[in-house]
Amino acid sequence: MPKVMADQIAAGEVVARPASCVKELIENSLDARATRIEVALVEGGIGSVTVIDDGEGMEPDDAVLAFQRHATSKVHEPRDLARIRTLGFRGEALAAIASVARVRLITRARGAESGILVRVEGGEIHPPEPVGAAFGTTMEVRDLFFNTPARLKYLRSAQTEQARSVEVVQRESLAHPEVAFVCRTERQVLFQTPGRGDAREVWAALYGVGEAKMLLEARADHGDYVVRGFIGRPTQARSSRQHGYLFVNGRPVRNVAVQQAIERAYGERLMVGRYPVYALYLEMDPVLVDPNVHPQKWEVRLSEERDVCELVESAVRAALDGTMLTVAPRVRR
Ligand code: ADP
Ligand code: MG
């Protein structure tokens, strides 16, 4: 099977829409230890998705290699897979994206004399050219699915696609309060987080200072796993689960059991059809988490799920009962 075709098949799993590109590109920036990540969407990301970071950048050879499938600098031996700490590990995202879009990569490694530009169109890699560039990496993905019309057809309106991409940036911003995120469209800056490591400040940037100030701190420590973060008061509940954020070892995840545990803790305090807002961060030994369940790495399997759920439920309950020591909000503005 031709390489491009194999990449396009992989793309079916990895990239479903502009929002999946946003997620993969942000994860790469985070893996490259960026402290500032800017995401720019044109036509809701259907026109283009650009992610600019100030991370480690790539050497010219690596910049070309990055588009080869299973080229990852992150997993060196099978044993590494058991202890995945970086966000990417399959080495297929860029190859997949580049097989169904027009990609421009501009990157300059720290200490490199100049930057390098690599263009890839529908999987065809053009020879790299030197360019002036700041340290870090800019990845522009244009015309997603230009060569796979069947998939292009499944994209929704620019407005809907934009909403999904923005959701991804919001989630990643909360997952990484230590990173300054900028999210903008061709028309305006949608939000901007300070990157000072304070999740409440991120919440303020996303949903307003007033909302952020009302949040309650939640924390519980089991030894093997720790949960911390904050939860909304019952009056802050929403009509969807969209603003319930769960992170496991820095990764935004969905886990139905944990979600139910949280809702159980609210119990009668919530009206029917209302869902709590929260940003809860679970930390545990990576061997207890299997992130390799879903191609988009979104669902995780927790090997001690029951215990984790109990811990989370008790943390949320304590926060709501006010039996947790409340810490004064530190929202600056
Ligand atoms: P993975 O993230 O699973 O390793 P990707 O296809 O997403 O695979 O990326 C391939 C490789 O390209 C990465 O392993 C990394 O070495 C390099 N890379 C991608 N994006 C960046 C970036 N923003 N900064 C530095 N290196 C990057
Ligand atoms: Mg990656």
Image (spheres, grey):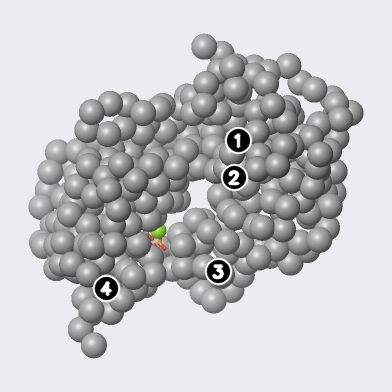
Amino acid bearing label 1? Arg
- Separation (CA) of disc 2 from disc 3: 24 Å
Residue 16: image x %, image y %?
35, 62
The answer to which of 150 and 226 lies nearer the viewer is: 150
Q: Nearer the viewer, residue 264 or 192?
A: 264
Residue position marked by numbered label 3 in the rendering: 292
Residue 241's mark? 2
The alpha-carbon separation of the residues under discs 3 and 1 comes to: 31 Å
Q: Mark 4 sits on what residue?
A: 8
Q: Amino acid at mark 2?
A: Arg
Q: Are marks 4 and 3 in contact (CB under 8 Å)?
A: no
Sequence-wise, the earlier of marks 2 and 3 is: 2
CA distance separating discs 1 and 2? 7 Å
Which mark is on residue 220? Answer: none
Q: Earlier in the sequence, mark 3 or mark 1?
A: 1
Name the residue rendered at 86%, 30% in the picture: 321
> Mark 4 or mark 1: which is in front?
1
Looking at the image, residue 179 sits to the left or right of residue 321; the answer is: left
Residue type pointed to by label 4 = Gln
Q: Nearer the viewer, mark 2 or mark 3?
A: 2
- In this view, the mark in front (2 or 4): 2
**Where residue 142 sits: x, y (%)?**
19, 51
Q: Ligand 1 closer than 8 Å to the CB at disc 4? A: no
Residue 33 quadrant: top left
Instruction: Check if mark 3's residue and mark 1's residue have beta carbons within 8 Å.
Output: no
